[in-house]
Image (cartoon, rainbow, N blue to C red):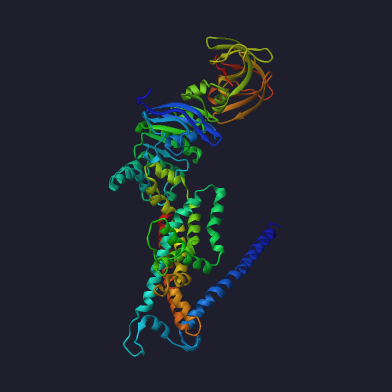
C-alpha cells in the first residue's frame, strides 16, 4: 500500500545478515501511529537488531523500512526523525543534564536559548528540574534513565525507540518506570517501540507485542491475545508459566478439538488453525486455569498426587505429579482460598481444567 | 583463640606494609640517581664559573644566567640590555616544538582513531606497525629523512617526475624540515596515548549523538574530543617536551639558521669551545619553562575533572 501514511513504521521483508549469519529472517510488520509497540524475545532473537535498523545504526541487508510512508533504510541515523533511549543511557558525561537534554534540539537548529527553555520543560516533565546543572555521574540509575528519556523526547521525534531501557533498574523502580513510560506515551502521543526480554514488562505496557525468536516473528498481537491464545510452543512457553501435555487429535470442529492422551483419556480443548485430525501436538494450559479437588469435577480431570506447595505471596503454586503425564503447576490465588482447596503433599487428587482453558499449539 | 588469630592477621598486615616500603626503594633509587641527581648537578653547575677548556671552577657566579638574558657589550662594561639572541632561539624552539606537536596531532589522531576502531585482534598489529621504524636509531632515521627531502632526493624527483612541479622544492634547511623531523621522531608518543583513550571511549555516545541529529563532524568535535581529551593532552606533552630540547633534527635538517635550544645546550658541552655553566643555565631555563607548561596543563585538567565529577 504505497502512500499509506497512517502507519508509523512499515517493515517490509527486512533481512539482516552478518556474513553467513542471518540475524533477521524476512520480518514484516506494521506499527500504527500512537501505538505502544513491544518487540519481545530472548537475547539473540533479533529484536535489538530490528530496533537498530529502524534507528539507522545497522543497515538493512534486504527489504524496506518506511516511516510514515517514507523509505528511510538508506538515511544515516542523524537524518531520521526518530530518537532512541539506549540500554546504558549513553548520556554525554562532560555535559550537564540540561545540556544533554538540549543537545538534540540544538542539533535540529534551535537557538541555544530556545533549546535550553525546551530542555527545561522536558526536565520538568520527568521531574528532574533540580538536577539540571549536575553531571550524569552525579545521578542515580533511575534518574539517569529519566534524563535519557527526556533527551530522546525533547526533539519531538515521530517515533521513540527504547532499547531495554529498564533492565538496569531494580524491581520496584522498574515497575514505577513502566507506568511512567506508559503515561508518558499517552500524554505525548508519540509512537513508542520498546524492546525487552521481560514478558511481564511487555504485557504490562504494550498495546501490541511482537514475540520474536531466532530472527523470526512468532506471533503479533495484543497482550491478551499473546497470553491467552499463544500460536505455538515457543510463545506459550516464553510468555508466563504454562503446563504442556502431549496429545493426539481425534477430531477438530468449530475451533474445538477432541484429543486423547497416551493412556487413552479423552480431552476437549481449543484448537488453532493448521492442526488436523491425527496430529500429535502439545496442549497448553495456564496454571491459574486449573483447580484441584478430591473427586473429578469437570469432564477434563487428570488424576495426580500433590508433590509440593510453594507459597509465592499472592498465590500458592502446587506441583502435581500426574498419573498420566508430566508434572503440572496449579496456581491458586490466596484471595480464592474460600472456593478452591489446597491439598497436603502426598494427597491423591484430581486436577480440573475450566472449560476452554486448554489450547492446542503448533510446534 | 579468636584474639590470637586477629593479632596474627594484623601482624601480617604490618609485614605487608613494611614490604611495601622496601619495594618502593628501587623506584626511589632510580628517581634519585637519574632524575634528582642530574638536575641538582645542573642547578649547581649553572651557578659556577666556567673553565676555558670545558669544565668548571668551584666559585659562585651568576654570569651564566647574566649571559643568557643580558647583553653588556663586548667587554662587559656597557649598561645591561636584554639579550635577544638566546631568547630568540628559545622562542623558535617553542614555536618549532609547537608546530611539530600540532602536526603529530593532525596525523596521529586519525591514525589512533583508525587503529582503535579496528577489530580487537588486529589492533596490536597496527600498533606494532606504528612502532617498527622506531627500532632504527634516531640519527639514522633523521639522516634518511634529510636524504628523502633534499633537492635531488626521491621526494623532489617524484614530484618533478609526475609534473606537479618544475624545479625542486627546498625543504632541507628550513623550519618546516625541522618540524617534519621532530614530528617523525616523536609521532608514536602521540599515537599511543590517543589510541589508549579512544579505545576506552564508549562508542554508544557517538550513536547517541548521531541519533540526536549530530553530523559525524559535530559528533567528533562535541562528543569524541572532550571524552578523549586526557589522551590528547598526554600525547601533546609527550611530543612537545622532547621536541623542545631536541638537537638532532634541528642540526641535521635545519642548518645554522634554524638553531634550537637543544643544539645550543649541546654546543656548550662539546669539545673545548663549550661553556658548562652557560649550558647548565640554559638547561635550567628550559626545564623551568617545561615545568610551567606541564603545571598549567595539569591545572587545566584538574579543573575539567572537578567540573566533571
Q: Name the foreground residue: B114 vs A42.
A: B114
Which residue is at a point 45% across and 33% down the rendered structure image? A194
Residue A150 vs residue B148: left or right? Answer: left
The quadrant of the rendering that contains the C terminus of chain B is bottom left
Which residue is at a point 70% across and 60% down the rendered structure image? B4
Q: Toward which corner of the image does residue B69 lie, by quadrant? A: bottom left
The quadrant of the rendering that contains the N terminus of chain B is bottom right
Q: Is residue B122 visible?
A: yes
Q: Is residue B302 visible?
A: no
Q: Name the foreground residue: B32 vs B128.
A: B128
Compared to B261, does A302 lie above or below?
A: above
Residue B241 vs residue A284: left or right? Answer: left
Residue A114 vs residue A164: left or right? Answer: left
Compared to A16, does B73 lie above or below?
A: below
Q: Toward which corner of the image does residue B23 lie, by quadrant? A: bottom right
Q: Toward which corner of the image does residue A358 lie, by quadrant? A: top right
The picture places residue B179, in percent across and down from the top left corner, at: 42, 65
The picture places residue B197, in percent across and down from the top left corner, at: 48, 55
Compared to A318, does B94 lie above or below?
A: below
The picture places residue A75, in percent across and down from the top left corner, at: 39, 37
Amino acid at each position: 500500500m504505497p502512500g499509506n501514511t497512517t502507519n508509523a513504521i512499515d517493515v517490509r521483508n527486512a533481512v539482516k545478515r552478518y556474513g553467513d549469519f542471518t540475524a533477521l529472517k524476512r520480518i514484516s510488520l506494521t506499527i500504527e501511529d500512537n501505538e505502544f509497540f513491544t518487540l519481545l524475545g530472548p537475547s539473540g532473537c533479533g529484536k535489538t537488531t530490528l530496533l537498530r535498523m529502524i534507528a539507522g545504526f545497522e543497515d538493512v541487508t534486504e527489504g524496506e523500512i518506511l516511516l510514515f510512508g517514507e523509505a528511510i533504510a538508506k538515511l544515516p541515523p542523524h537524518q531520521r526523525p526518530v530518537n532512541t533511549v539506549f540500554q546504558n543511557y549513553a548520556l554525554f558525561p562532560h555535559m550537564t543534564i540540561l545540556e544533554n537534554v538540549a543537545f538534540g534540539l540544538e542539533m535540529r537548529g534551535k537557538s541555544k536559548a530556545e533549546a535550553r527553555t525546551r530542555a527545561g520543560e522536558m526536565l520538568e516533565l520527568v521531574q528532574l528540574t533540580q538536577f539540571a546543572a549536575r553531571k550524569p555521574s552525579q545521578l542515580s540509575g533511575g534518574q539517569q534513565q529519566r534524563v535519557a528519556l527526556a533527551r530522546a523526547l525533547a526533539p519531538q521525534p515521530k517515533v521513540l525507540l527504547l532499547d531495554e531501557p529498564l533492565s538496569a533498574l531494580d524491581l520496584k523502580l522498574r515497575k514505577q518506570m513502566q507506568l511512567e513510560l506508559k503515561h508518558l506515551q499517552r500524554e505525548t502521543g508519540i509512537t513508542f517501540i520498546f524492546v525487552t526480554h521481560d514478558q511481564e514488562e511487555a504485557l504490562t505496557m504494550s498495546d501490541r507485542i511482537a514475540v520474536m525468536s531466532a530472527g523470526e516473528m512468532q506471533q503479533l498481537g495484543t497482550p491478551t491475545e499473546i497470553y491467552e491464545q499463544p500460536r505455538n510452543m515457543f510463545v506459550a512457553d516464553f510468555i508466563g508459566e504454562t503446563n504442556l501435555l502431549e496429545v493426539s487429535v481425534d477430531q477438530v470442529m468449530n475451533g474445538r478439538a477432541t484429543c486423547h492422551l497416551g493412556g487413552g483419556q479423552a480431552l476437549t480443548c481449543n484448537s488453532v488453525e493448521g492442526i488436523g485430525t491425527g496430529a500429535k501436538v502439545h496442549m497448553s494450559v495456564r496454571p491459574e486455569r486449573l483447580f484441584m479437588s478430591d473427586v473429578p469435577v469437570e469432564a477434563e480431570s487428570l488424576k495426580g498426587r500433590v508433590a509440593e506447595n510453594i507459597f509465592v505471596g499472592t498465590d500458592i503454586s502446587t506441583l502435581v505429579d500426574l498419573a498420566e503425564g508430566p508434572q503440572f503447576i496449579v496456581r491458586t490465588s490466596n484471595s480464592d482460598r474460600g472456593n478452591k482447596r489446597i491439598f497436603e503433599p502426598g494427597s491423591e487428587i484430581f486436577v480440573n481444567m475450566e472449560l476452554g482453558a486448554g489450547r492446542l499449539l503448533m510446534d | 583463640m579468636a584474639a590470637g588469630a586477629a593479632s596474627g592477621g594484623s601482624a601480617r598486615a604490618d609485614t605487608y606494609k613494611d614490604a611495601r616500603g622496601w619495594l618502593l626503594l628501587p623506584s626511589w633509587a632510580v628517581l634519585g640517581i637519574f632524575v634528582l641527581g642530574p638536575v641538582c648537578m645542573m642547578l649547581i653547575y649553572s651557578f659556577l664559573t666556567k673553565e676555558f677548556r670545558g669544565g668548571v671552577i668551584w666559585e659562585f657566579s651568576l654570569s651564566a644566567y647574566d649571559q643568557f638574558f643580558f647583553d653588556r657589550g663586548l667587554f662587559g662594561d656597557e649598561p645591561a640590555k636584554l639579550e635577544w639572541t638566546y631568547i630568540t632561539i628559545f622562542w623558535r624552539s617553542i614555536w618549532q616544538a609547537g608546530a611539530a606537536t600540532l602536526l603529530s596531532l593532525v596525523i596521529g589522531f586519525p591514525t589512533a582513531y583508525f587503529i582503535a576502531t579496528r577489530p580487537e585482534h588486529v589492533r596490536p598489529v597496527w600498533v606494532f606497525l606504528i612502532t617498527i621504524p622506531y627500532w632504527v636509531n634516531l640519527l639514522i632515521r633523521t639522516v634518511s629523512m634529510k636524504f628523502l627531502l633534499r633537492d635531488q632526493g626521491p621526494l623532489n624527483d617524484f614530484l618533478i617526475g609526475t609534473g606537479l612541479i618544475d624545479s625542486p622544492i627546498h625543504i632541507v634547511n628550513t623550519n618546516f624540515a625541522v618540524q617534519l623531523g621532530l614530528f617523525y621522531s616523536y609521532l608514536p608518543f602521540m599515537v599511543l596515548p590517543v589510541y589508549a583513550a579512544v579505545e576506552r571511549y564508549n562508542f554508544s555516545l557517538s550513536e547517541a549523538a548521531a541519533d540526536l541529529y549530530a553530523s559525524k563532524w559535530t559528533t567528533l568535535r562535541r562528543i569524541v574530543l572532550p571524552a578523549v581529551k586526557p589522551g590528547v593532552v598526554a600525547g601533546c606533552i609527550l611530543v612537545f617536551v622532547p621536541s623542545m630540547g631536541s638537537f638532532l633534527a634541528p642540526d641535521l635538517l635545519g642548518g645554522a639558521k634554524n638553531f634550537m635550544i637543544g643544539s645550543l645546550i649541546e654546543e656548550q658541552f662539546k669539545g673545548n669551545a663549550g661553556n658548562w655553566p652557560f649550558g647548565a643555565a640554559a638547561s635550567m631555563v628550559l626545564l623551568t619553562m617545561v615545568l610551567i607548561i606541564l603545571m598549567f596543563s595539569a591545572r587545566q585538567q584538574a579543573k575539567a575533572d572537578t567540573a566533571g565529577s
